[in-house]
Amino acid sequence: MNQFGGRPGIIVLREGTDTSQGKPQLISNINACQAVADAVKSTLGPRGMDKLIYDGRQVTISNDGATIMKLLEIAHPAAKTLVDISMSQDAEVGDGTTSVVLLAGEILKQLKPFVEEGVHPQIIMKNVRDAGRLAVQKVLDLAVPSNEDDKDEMLLKCASTALNSKLISSHQDLFAPMVVDAVKMLHEAGNLEELKNLVAIKKIPGGDVRSSFLVQGVAFKKTFSYAGFEQMTKKFTNPKVLLLNVELELKSEKENAEVRIEDPEQYQSIVDAEWQVIYDKLDACVACGANIVLSKLPIGDLATQYFADRGLFCAGRVEDGDLKRVAKATGASIQTSTNGIFDGVLGTCGLFEEKQVGDERFNVFTECTKSLTSTLVLRGGSEQFIAESERSIHDALMVVKRSIQSEAVVAGGGAVEMEVSKYLREHALTIEGKGQLIVSAFAKALEVVPRQLCDNAGFDSTDILSALRRKHAKDDGGKWFGVDIANGDICDTYVSGVWEPSDNKSNSLAAAAEAACVILSIDETVINPRSQDPGAHHSGMMPGMDGQKPSNLMGNALDAVNAQQGGSRSGNLGNGVSYMKGRGGA
């Protein structure tokens, strides 16, 4: 007889559903997050290592936290929270994607003993939220506001710091000024929020990375072209630009189209009418006075030859993003018809030319009337190198944008984390009860950033951390002391020019604390079996299984996560967690 007084157990969940709850479940989730943090921790800092990820189709080599987290395809449902905070950090700030995962994993690691000893998760969460709020406020208090006189220097140092941990760190003297110039142009025009749309990054394999250059305007690769293209004029000064979303080629009749005629001469009139339609469109483009015609849709061989004979340049199948950038730069409006074109819809620029860059030909618009758009053309020896360069430039662009918006910087190299850790330790002594220990654990977790910077550079992290703790505790001017990667010691990273926007650190701390609270708030996980037959019964049985339990989709991932805890049988979420077939934990 069971607890229901002899009555059979009530089946609430589908047959084969995996459920686990309680303390073992919480510890299992924390272990999974630690495993994720361990996977990316070696990529942190200037001496961080790269990861090579092969997904069956292409190879990616990167040390960008958000890229790695996205490509890992993490299966554990709770550990996916770390992927989310990494992606949000990438979208919000652009840099610090590895740091935020590392911080969240370390906070959970420091809090795990409290969970094991039976402290209620709600008490832990309350104090973690308080500690996170205090940490963010401390970062804002520490931040050094910039002034107009040295604003350019601040932006250059922030861009250099963002590039310092990337594959192209040895070329930051080339790329940092490019990035700053591109973002400043947008800022001066008041279009900073459209950074992703108005600053393009083009990749051309081959050549030296030092051959990369910035076009203060628009550049895009030559599109597919028809016969007659080589006869076109390839260079214009102060041209008029017409942008179309119109197809300029003869269309074949639709399948099974039927035209009834009574006289063979009528057939010729139909053919002539088709030709007249396309000629009317071409005449309208020429009559408006345009020198350059770009279209999102195809421009056929007839139109290409027609424009070439009249000294015009044309390009069809231009990508939507490139066409919109040309519209922004030249002041042109994209037309969906060739009827009624007037001067007001045409754009202009100082110079247009088609240039050879490596093996590719590029259409380049410069000296544009509206200095809104920029194009960074990246060169490099391999596709993987250029792809990683693009990710690095994206991070630097976002960091400079955030620096302009926050107008305040803090020192990097683990200096901020050590100062906030010292502040939280002192604050913890004013708290009574368990909260004191939890806030102290949060403070200790922040030390993971300088510690990992040391480990990745091959230094003794124990000695350097001890020196940092002493410097921050004893010296009034020691608040900006962090890890000196160059010499294996400690130094004033603010004086060394290792600067980051204050929003980077405050966003990292807030996101890491929030992620830790999300993980701690989960007390039960329910994994429903996936039916292989759309018409399967609601019982959850798969056809041909003969009553066997379906395999646990998460089994392998979860077994690996829990292996350090002594292992658990396949399908379990953690040690001590029994299967529950819908009996509410019975």
Image (spheres, grey):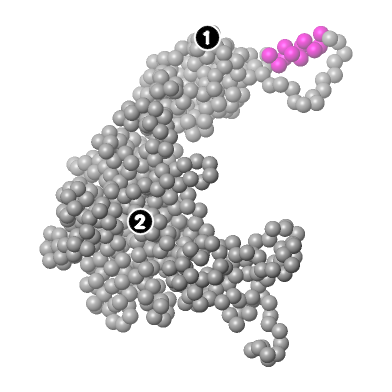
SS of the residue under disc 2: helix
Q: Tell me if mark 1 has few (under 14), some (14-19) or many (20+) residues whose alpha carbon lies within 10 angstroms of its own.
A: few
- Residue under circle 2? 41
> 226 and 243: which one is in front?
226
> 115 and 56: which one is in front?
56
* Disc 2 from disc 1: Cα separation: 61 Å
Q: Which mark is residue 310?
A: 1
Residue 549 in percent (x, y) is at 66, 68
Q: Residue at x 39, y 40 (%)?
A: 388
In this rendering, the answer to whether 495 lies above or below 10 is: above
- Asked if the residues shown at circle 2 and circle 1 are in contact, with their CB atoms under 8 angstroms apart, the answer is no
> 251 and 549: which one is in front?
549
Q: Quadrant of residue 187?
A: top left
Residue 240 in percent (x, y) is at 45, 19
What is the span of residues highlighted in magenta in the rendered image?
265-275
Q: Residue at x 61, y 14 (%)?
A: 302
Q: Residue 10 carries which label?
A: none
> 151 and 92: which one is in front?
92
The tag earlier along the polypeptide, 2 or 1, is 2
Left or right: 87, with 489 as reference point:
right
Q: Tell me if mark 2 has few (under 14), some (14-19) or many (20+) residues whose alpha carbon lies within 10 angstroms of its own.
A: many
Amino acid type, residue under disc 2 in the picture:
Lys
Left or right: 240, with 149 as reference point:
right
Q: Residue at x 25, y 41 (%)?
A: 156
Residue 483 in percent (x, y) is at 21, 55
Amino acid type, residue under disc 1 in the picture:
Arg
Q: Can residue 419 be seen here?
A: no
Is 360 magenta? The answer is no
SS of the residue under disc 1: loop
Is 274 magenta? The answer is yes
